[in-house]
Amino acid sequence: MIPEPSLPQARRLEAGVLAVLLSAVGYGSIPFFAMVGYAGNLTPEIAVVARYGFPALLLGWLLPRALKSGTGGKQFMLTGMLMGLGAWAFFKALALLPITLAILLFFSYPLFSQALKLAMSRRGIGFYGVLSALLSVIGVILALISSSGDTAFSTKGLAFGLMAPAAYALVLHKMNHGADYLAPLQVAACLFAGTLLITMPLFLLSDTPQAFPEGLSGWGALLGLMLLTGILPQFLMAYGAPIAGRAITASAGGLEFMTALVLGSVAVQSVPSPLEWVSAGFIVIALVLASRLDKAEFDR
């Protein structure tokens, strides 16, 4: 029989799980603060630099040691650049597409994850991998059908919307094959530094005029992106993930998705259509399947 954890161990496990769940809620609130910020004169470039630049500066003191500890730190910096590109694409999609469609497209990343595994593995992806990808495709098709008559629909936004999950799938692949000798916050420091390296040029080269936020909503959204979606969830995840375990941590993506969908809808004062809720159901199942497949692959 497996011994039950002692009371201190059980409480520590509960704290770890709670930290992971709160972290997922923080990450999921990105669309909310982005949309509030856009109404307060923020641009996607300002939003993405605020979201990733502040944590990069705050964790910068961990960077030198991480870069000296083998090649892992440098690899994670490159991964961070890819993450920054995907994040910028997501913020652009939020500005150009109906918000529900932008969110559904981003969380279709299991499709791209399974396509990447199929391209890089000789063993194939198996039945559940195919099922995860198929459910993602169905979810995306339903979301596109639901948004096809929306005046806010943009083919340019659609390109950004698909670019974001493709980049994120590559980031997840690297994270699943990371350097175990780096502490979670060291990994975060490398990722955020890489993200800042790519987002700052995008900010400086943008042809959209960049301006200070306007009013309480603009400044509040900026602070929310910096703190509530940036550094705070990162600390919570760094604390909770090693305690909660890989299965719970990976499965938190479903909570992040639902948080993004609900809070994003609140921000624009709209309710997803029945077809969009059906699409969301397919995406949630695909996310859960993908998280279990990632854990099984990691544990082999």
Image: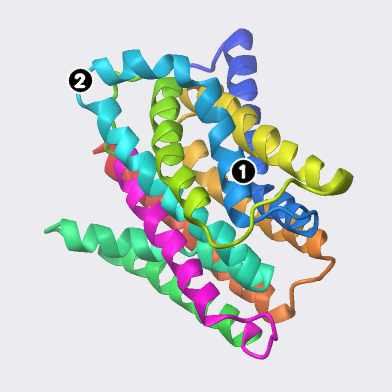
Q: Which mark is residue 80?
A: none
Q: Nearer the viewer, residue 62 or 15?
A: 62
Residue at (52, 45) in percent of width and height: 251
In the picture, residue 284 is in which quadrant?
bottom right
170 left or right, relative to 277 = left
- Residue at the disc numbered 2: 70
- Where is residue 187? Give x, y as percent: 39, 27
Q: Nearer the viewer, residue 235 or 11?
A: 235
**Could you tell me which quadrant the C terminus lies in?**
top left
The 10 Å Cα crowd at callout 2, few under 14, some 14 to 19, many 20 or more, is few
Residue at (38, 61) in percent of width and height: 166
Residue type (three-letter) at the residue carrying disc 2: Gly
In the picture, residue 70 is in which quadrant?
top left
Task: Compute the Cα span from label 2 to label 1.
Answer: 29 Å
- Where is residue 3? Give x, y as percent: 48, 16
- Residue at the disc numbered 1: 27
Residue at (31, 61) in percent of width and height: 114
Give the residue at the far bottom of this rendering. Answer: 149
Q: Is residue 20 visible?
A: no
**Could you tell me which quadrant the N terminus lies in?**
top left
Q: Main secondary structure of the magenta part?
A: helix
15 is higher (above) or lower (below) than 90: above
Q: Nearer the viewer, residue 122 or 214?
A: 214
Residue at (74, 72) in percent of width and height: 272
Q: Which residues are magenta?
A: 147-176
SS category of the residue bearing label 2: loop
Give the residue at the far left of this rendering. Answer: 122
Whether pointer 2 and pointer 1 mark residues with C-beta atoms closer than 8 Å, the reply is no
Residue type (three-letter) at the residue carrying disc 1: Tyr
Count the marks: how many? 2
